[in-house]
Amino acid sequence: MKKYAFILFALLSLTSCTKDEPTPEIDQEELGGAKLIFTAVEKQEIDGKVSYLPVEGEEVQEIKFDDKTFLPEAGAHVDLEEGHTYKMDLIAYDFLKREVQQTFLNKPENHQAFLLGADEKILSFEYGDEHNVGISNYITIHEGDKKVQLQYIMRHLTAAAKQTLKASDWNNPDISVGSVDLKLVFEVHLVKEDHHH
């Protein structure tokens, strides 16, 4: 009887997932923390190529996310100035505190990040890679004097689903295809120029 029960369990285990359901590359439960780094940059166009250079003397800000809850510390936020552009980098860690964000870039056909919580009037967003994976991104602040709660969401997608998405979907809250590899919720204070905390 035990032999038949084991065979039934094995069969059920094998049929629990369908081929079309993407399996998260690094399940959030397997990650050992994350952080987002914000660096002030200036956009420059040279010979038709756009590049972003760090602004000298500007403080690099970061927000860290707990390795269990993936929440920032109470009261943690970043101050981003109206009219400025920032490079936003994701750093993700495994339980040994090794960086693993490259895993998302290694399979660009299966990953895309989204930044929810603000529309184009408040900020604009540009993916930092040609495949719209979103490990590095550029955000420009259009409105100051407000606080917003943003969600950085890395989705794991089938290749077919990824092909239906565009760069302009970066803040589309109706995107629900695939599964969530990583979700980070954080507060941003959008401030007028020369505001100091």
Image (spheres, rainbow, N blue to C red):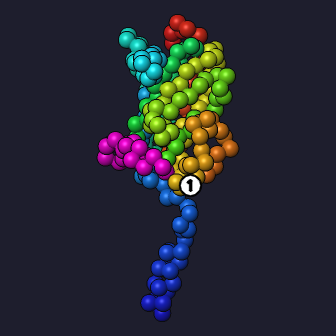
Residue 51 can be seen, yes or no: yes
Q: Who's the residue at 63% across and 49% down the image?
A: 176
| Residue lying at the far front of the rendered structure | 47
Estimate how packed mark 1 is, as few (under 14), some (14 to 19) or many (20 or more) residues with alpha carbons within 10 Å: few
**Extreme residue toward the bottom, this view:** 1
Q: Is residue 170 left or right of residue 99?
A: right
Q: Which residue is mark 1?
A: 160
Task: List x then y, in percent, for residue 170.
Answer: 59, 36
At horizontal 62% and vertical 17% (from top left) the residue drawn is 142
| Residue type beneath disc 1 | Ala
Magenta-colored stretch includes residue 6? no
Whether residue 169 is situated above or below residue 83 in the rendered picture: below
Q: Position of residue 175 (x, y in %)?
A: 64, 45
Residue 74 position within the rendered picture, expressed as x and y whole percent measured from the top left: 52, 30
Q: Residue at x 45, y 35 (%)?
A: 129
Q: Residue furthest top?
A: 194
Magenta range is 93-110
Look at the numbered disc 1 and give the secondary structure of its residue.
Answer: helix
Say whether residue 116 is visible. Answer: no
Whether residue 92 sits left or right of residue 127 in the image: it is left
